[in-house]
Amino acid sequence: MIDSMAPENMTFTASAPSNIAFVKYWGKRDAAIQWPANDSLSMTLTRCRTITSAKKIPGSRDIFRFEGQELTSDRKSSSHKVFEHLGRLREELRVTSALDITSQNTFPTACGIASSASGFAALTLAATAALTGETEWDKLAVLGMPRQRLAHLARMGSGSAGRSIFGGFVHWAAGDTANSQEIVEICPSSHWGLSDLVIVFSGHSKHTSSSDAHKAAWGSPFFPARLAGIHSRMERVRAAIKSRNIEALGEQIESDALEMHAVAMTGTPAANYIQEDTARFLAWVRQERSTGGLPAWFTIDAGPNVHLICETNAYASVAKRVAEAWPQVRVIMDQIGPGPTLARGTAKELFGEVTNV
């Protein structure tokens, strides 16, 4: 592929959602090539998104601004992965153009709500559009960049970003080899109306990065047992989604989340993401479900914040009960969604003023 006919300073914007994993991937067989230790399955969200714009510019230096602040490509900085990813995309497309990129989230960053998933998904799509001049999925496929390929490129920036290239319910199969990994949408968002109430106990960056905790997982005495049981759990979760059985799904996602955090807390070194308020909230959910019929189940990614999953027809009543019992806690209301969008134009032209959810 060669540089597209898209002129410099023509802006392309991607809006990519976060996702919440119902079965988490935890631990990597090979971190350098983002080969996970196990399969995972997620639900793509709607409102928690990253909006990223990209355009070609003269010269060889990329510019990246996140929420108004220009970030550095220094290898010691946390933003180095962004510039590394841009280089990877250029190599894949066999192009040389530098890019000017601006990005912003509609939700808190780096606190366990999968901002790296939406971030690298949006970055992959916006940069690819700017480098090829294409925004339509079928035309990108003709250029050798079908959605599946874009998903695998996105996961090289952040593993879970590959799932955010699709909508609905998404299965990331680890495969028997690194090259046999697959990321596929198993059911569209129209299949089942589920809502996600994100209970935000902390908007601050987590103390232990997910990358570090993935490495530490192999030192946990519980990790082999988790890996041995993942296949059967995946089957149960897929069956619950297919039959739209919220109780069966809820039982599995709670067990999986607690199991993952048990591995994290017993890894070498240990990582503890569950704060006191988090633990109290989890106990409250189970008590309210047992005695008050609360039709909601929790899951937690690598952070202190909780995702409360329920069917959309129960969303208003669940939100009301959470607000009454936990009035001091911020709640982000979200739901299953159809996936990312990609278009020509700036973020402001396409979405107006982007605000936090």
Image: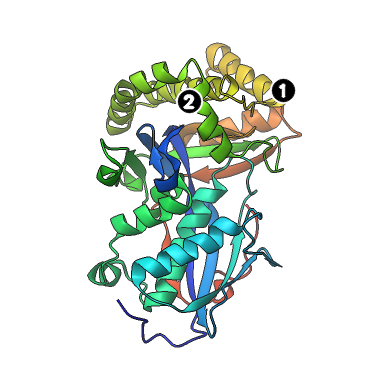
Label 2, secondary structure: give it.
Answer: helix
Q: Position of residue 182 (x, y in %)?
A: 28, 45
Q: Amino acid at mark 2?
A: Trp
- On screen, 72 above or below 244? below
Residue in view at x 39 percent, y 68 percent:
91
Q: Nearer the viewer, residue 182 or 164?
A: 182
Q: Which residue is mark 2?
A: 218
Tag 1: amino acid: Glu
- In this view, the residue farthest toward the top is 291
Does the image show residue 20? yes
> Residue at horizontal 59%, vertical 17%?
288
Q: How many marks?
A: 2
Front-most of 313 and 38? 38
Q: Is residue 28 left or right of residue 181?
A: right
Compared with 107, 218 (above or below) is above
Where disc 1 sits, the SS reads helix
Image quarter of residue 265? top right
